[in-house]
Amino acid sequence: MADMPEILVVGSFVKDLIVSTARFPEAGETVLGFDFQTASGGKGANQAIQAARLGAHVTMVGKVGDDIYGRELIASCTENGIDCSHVMVDEKAPSSIGNVQLQMSQDGRSQNRIIVVPGANMAIREEDIAFLEAEIEGYDMVLLQLEIPMRINERVVDMAYRKNVPVMLNSAPSDRISDSLLSKLAYISPNEYEAADLTGVTIRRDGRKVNEEDVKGAIRKLLEKGVKNVLITLGAAGAAFGNRKEFFLCPAVERIIAVDPTAAGDSFVGAFSTLVSMGIGHERAVCIANHVGALTVSRMGAQPSLPTLEQVRALLRERGENTLLEAEKAAV
């Protein structure tokens, strides 16, 4: 596998409008916040930038509105070296925005609530992506999410499947996914709640410990539908991975203060996909991706919080993860 893998991301752009407050308002109530900022985001763009910051050559396909947010969203990607020549501008639909509310506790921890208005993300048409039929085989992996029309994801999966290009679907936000689409995926990455929606298996937990049999049951259900590899993120419990031959749980990184959980899942998926495309094995890729996600939650904003390769290496050294560090160095 090439040192600099070729990653294609077909997905969303979202401009986050972030309000911080001491507590969320109740229905009909107004509370005063203490901070406001904007940040470029969107699951697709976040994953693209994380992949680029870890050393991948990334092409982004998506759609924004003909407005200031759209221009800022594209600029954020191009500044990170991403090829945005296939990002389209819709003259009718506005760029997508995310209303992000952060409840900040006195110890610096936070919870978030997010409302996304899809805008131009849902205006992508099949003819907009027809060019991929001839180009998709040039990529090492394709990353998809569920913030664009399902028919677009289905079309991209079909094209990649015919050319034997592996697809990672980050199945968020939760939605119904056809068995046909699932059967063509190399990887799927739901969180525990999305996994329950897909499989009917509720993953029970006791604090940071999850019920391993529940996790195995959810993974087994997805493997039975034809997915080759299943990666379930478990929040403070870390992440689980399984296929026909492997199963493991990788714990979350400890002693990290979560300042803003926005984009943590995206950084994890972008990192894992990049590391696997570089030739790193699944277990090491998951554990390194956990460190990438830990750095992300320790900072404010979506894309501003996504770490670089050097920052990830520094955290691995600090935590004494020499085995993971050497594996990562050997691959890149």
Image (cartoon, rainbow, N blue to C red):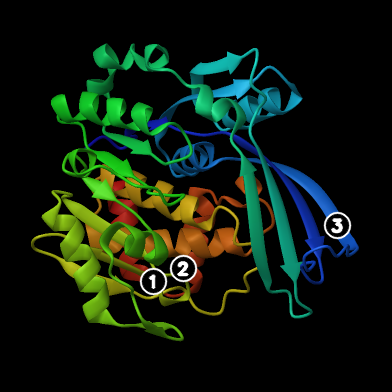
Picture quadrant where residue 261 is located: bottom right
Q: Any mark on residue 317, and which?
A: 2
Residue 56 pos. (x, y %): 40, 36
Label 1 CA crowd tier, 10 Å (few <14, some 14–19, many 20+):
some
Query: Is 125 on the left-hand or right-hand side of 306?
Result: left
**Element type at marker 1?**
loop
Query: Is 93 on the left-hand or right-hand side of 206?
Result: right
Q: CA distance from mark 2 to mark 1?
A: 6 Å
- Per the image, the residue denoted by label 3 is 35
**9 to 231, vertically: above or below:** above
- Per the image, the residue denoted by label 1 is 321
Quarter occupied by the N terminus:
top left
Label 2 CA crowd tier, 10 Å (few <14, some 14–19, many 20+):
some
Q: Are marks 2 and 1 in contact (CB under 8 Å)?
A: yes
Residue 315 pos. (x, y %): 51, 65
Is any atom of residue 325 visible in this view?
no
**54 to 198, vertically: above or below:** above
User: Quick one: 26 or 223, which is closer to the camera?
Assistant: 26
User: Quick one: 140 or 146, which is closer to the camera?
Assistant: 146
Q: Amino acid at mark 2?
A: Arg
List the single residue furthest toward the bottom: 206
Q: Identify the residue at image location x=65%, y=15%.
A: 92
